[in-house]
Image (cartoon, grey):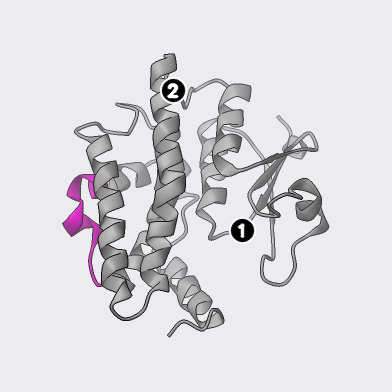
Amino acid sequence: MSKEDLLLLDFWVSPFCMRVKIALAEKGLDYESKEEDLFGGKSELLLKSNPVYQKVPVLLHNGKPLNESAIIVGYIDEKWPSPPLLPACAYGRSQARFWADYIDKKLFDATCTVWRSTGEAVEVAKKDFIEVLKVLEEALGEKTFFGGETFGFVDIVAIPMASWFYASEKFGNFTVEAECPKLSAWIKRSMQRESVAKVLPDPEKVYDFVVMFRKMQGIE
C-alpha cells in the first residue's frame, strides 16, 4: 500500500485521532498525516471533507472522506480484515459496539469535566468520572483486554482517553490506579503494545495543553 492512499487529518492531542492511528498501526498500514490548526484556522480540506461537524479525525481513503473515529476504526477493520479488531460472532461484535458507544457518550466528557470544573464542582465531577471508570472496570472484569485475550476494537476506542487521565488526576487530586486498579493494569498492558506506545502523547504534555486551554477558556 502506498502512502498516498491514506491521508489522516490529525490533531496531536485528540484521543479520537489517536484511535485511528492505533487502528492503522494494528493493521500495519502506511498513511500520511496532516496536522490541523484547530485554533488558528481549519484547513479547506477539513471543512470540505467533514462539512457537518468540521472536526478531526478525517481519514481520506483514495480521496473519499471518512468521519467520526469509531466509524473510521470500523471501516479500517472491514476494509483490511486481518488481524481482526472485532469478534468473529455477531453477538460479540454487538457487545463491542455497545461499549464503544458507552465510552463515546461518557468517558471523554467525564474526564474533561474534572479539569473544566472549579471549586466544589471538582468533587462532583471527580465522583462522576470515577463512576464511569468503575463501570468500565466491571466490563473488563478479569480479562486481559476488553474483548478477551486479544487487543481489539473496544481497547482501541478506550485507550487514547488514558493520555488525558493525568490532567484530571492533577486537577481532581486523585489517582486512577488507587480508584480502579484493574483498569489501571489494563492501561499498562495496552501501553506495552507498540501501536499504542508510539501514538499516545506524554500525559505531561497533555496536562500542559489542558492548562493552556483552561486559560484560553478563562477557567481559573
Q: Mark 1 points at which residue?
A: 11
Side of 123 relative to 194 (left or right): left
Is residue 7 in sight in this rendering? yes
Categorize mark 2 by other alpha carbons within 10 Å: few (<14), some (14-19), many (20+).
some
Numbered disc 2: secondary structure: helix
Distance of mark 2 from mark 1, alpha carbons?
A: 29 Å
Mark 1 neighbour class, 10 Å CA radius: few under 14, some 14 to 19, many 20 or more: some
Q: Is the magenta stretch mostly helix, strand or loop?
A: helix
The answer, for residue 167, to whether it is visible in the render is: no
Residue 179 in the magenta stretch? The answer is: yes
Is 156 left, or right, of 73 in this rendering?
left
Q: Is residue 135 above or below residue 204?
A: above
Which comes before the other along the chain, label 2 or label 1?
A: 1
Q: Quadrant of the N terminus?
A: top right
Q: In which quarter of the image is the C terminus?
A: bottom left
Q: In which quarter of the image is residue 7?
A: top right
The part of the chain drawn in magenta is 173-185
